Image (spheres, rainbow, N blue to C red):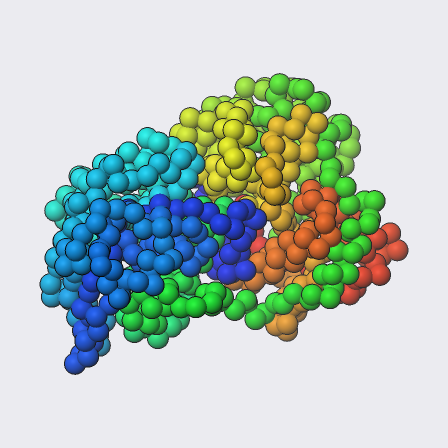
Amino acid sequence: MGPPAPPGASLRISSRAADAGGMSTRPRLLVVGSPSLDLLRFGRRSVRSAGGAGLYTALAAQRAGAEVTLVAPRPDPMPAELERADGLLDWRGPTVPPSALPHFEIEYFPDGRTVYRRAVRGSEGDIRNGDIPDAGPGSFAYVVPLLDPELQLTFARRLSAAGVRVGCGTYAPGIRAHREVVARVVEASDYFFCNEEEAGLLFGSLDEVAVPAGGVVFVTRGSRGARVVLGDHQINVPAPEVEEVDPTGAGDTFCGTALARLAAGDHPAIAARVAADRAAQTVTGIGPAPLLADGPPPVAPPDARVRLDGDRIRRVAGVIATAPAAAAFDFTGPRFPEPGDPVALDSFFAATVQQFGFWREGAGRYEAPMIASLGGRALKGSDYLWAAYLRWAREAPGQLTPAGHAVLDDADFDHRLRDDRGRNPLSAGTLHPACARAYGRDMLGLGLTPASLLAEANAAERPLARFLARLDAVGGYKEDPWRKKSALLAAILSQRPERFLRLGAGEDVPPIVDYHCQRSCLRLGVVSVTDETLAARLAKREVVSAGEEEAVRAACHEAVGEIRHLSGRSMGAVDWFFFQNRTRCPEMTEPDCAACPADSACAHRTRLFQPVFRTIAY
């Protein structure tokens, strides 16, 4: 199992993160599955509509920004209900008469029941392996829950063998009739989609859903949103409240949107948040009409408790654009491994897992930062951690490997992190060794070492995107949808003299948002707290709720990303500026505004403090 779920594992992920990965804005997705021609009955009203899991998935992915190839029987002549979709998609497949398409008669009742009065499979089974084009290694594909699960399994395995990232769905009758086959479909999938009923049929219950390291399961839950299962770790995302008209296609819209966002580089939980919003929008219309609407899809409003100050962001970005202090740090020096040290990779991967929780709580409030003595020097937070891991690398380098971390017990971890008094001063208790073990076990489960993970990433067309996606499956990193530790590790490895990680054309590290960064954003005024109650709690340094913390962190994440864009500097340079600001605008003493390059652009809201919230993310 992974590390204990910290408070806030059920995050409300803001739709501001729709491009959180900072990756390609035009990913490609291959969808295997047929459209249908349906008759929808709403009381005395009947509507003829296009439908089918393949069509909804493809249109949702296209509306989420992907270029979509739909592999499905292609009717000739093209029915009017499908003409618009045909113009949006690269539709390939055997030619059939319109009457040969699958078609369904579906009746909806005011109490929420849905009854399929008629279901005709049609030409769905006419798709053959030869109809599926070569998508290429690293690309994404989705195979709809075909009426024949064996055929779905055949397609999934073929695509997976070609190096394609494969998503698959299911449906309850198929599980009841062919449970063992569907279980093999789960095994063959990188991303598996089901609803709560289907999760119960396959796994026993929602809470029992788990897959081996590297697997991702998305469980849709209607108005309650969705659950994302990353191996053995679960993250819940909400759904907005809407007035439902036609629930057909909501799950397929979720699939297509999530896969498009995954292909663009999002963390699975961020992809799910966007997907839940789009699925909710789909049920407000009839059939796929909302997916065929002109213009961009509606964007969920940001959390009203906080807002971004565009003018202040521009002013701070202007300072960083010219500030000598805004230069990327190369992570060398007395607390880091020497360039060329063979233990450096294991040390950086393992130590960055522990970059969180360097503060103490007392009586429901922030009490003090973590400061401890090592080698006769008082070191704070991450400075202490780097020094302790450098000592560890010299004393027992084998323990820093994934295999060594997988079996690390609490006592040995405490010994390796000991200060001059012989005690482990890290403030988050057993969360630290639990994260260490989760890191080691997932890396072993994936068959990876730091060196092999980097070799795989550097061989990809988009090395950073591949690197971050891989860490989304690794304990200690995967739990954070905002990828603070993953982004920090990417910065370390790309900025070190060895240049362990290369960045592809147009790639840059995502915003690195920890509590120092949030404190600076609030005090500078690039993020304003408009909710008086929340502002008062921040000023009093009181422990806040998961939703309150997420509202502030989401806004800071967006603000830092915008500062990077406007300043023209790399995220490494922007992050180093904010990290250095911790000494000019510290936790326990008055800010030294005269020493701050951003003083002229600052709102001087010095009473504000970062959200006080225990998490393994930062």
At a point 56% along the width and 62% down the height, the residue shown is 551
Q: Estimate the x, y position of residue 395 in percent, counting from the top left.
A: 63, 19
User: Is the N terminus in the top left, top right, bottom left or bottom right quadrant?
Assistant: top left
Residue at the outermost front position: 77
At a point 18% along the width and 58% down the height, the residue shown is 98
Q: How many marks?
A: 0
> Residue 272's quadrant in the figure?
bottom left
Residue at the outermost bottom position: 44
At a point 25% along the width and 49% down the height, the residue shown is 72
Nearer to the camera, 138 or 404: 138
Nearer to the camera, 119 or 608: 119
**Up-down: is 9 above or below 425?**
below
- Residue 543 visible in image: no
- Residue 343 visible in image: yes
At a point 57% along the width and 25% down the height, the residue shown is 346
Nearer to the camera, 530 or 273: 273
Left or right: residue 359 versus residue 178 is: right
Residue at the outermost right position: 594
**Up-down: is 264 above or below 350?**
below
> Residue 334's quadrant in the figure?
top right
Q: Estimate the x, y position of residue 426 in percent, counting from the top left.
A: 62, 39
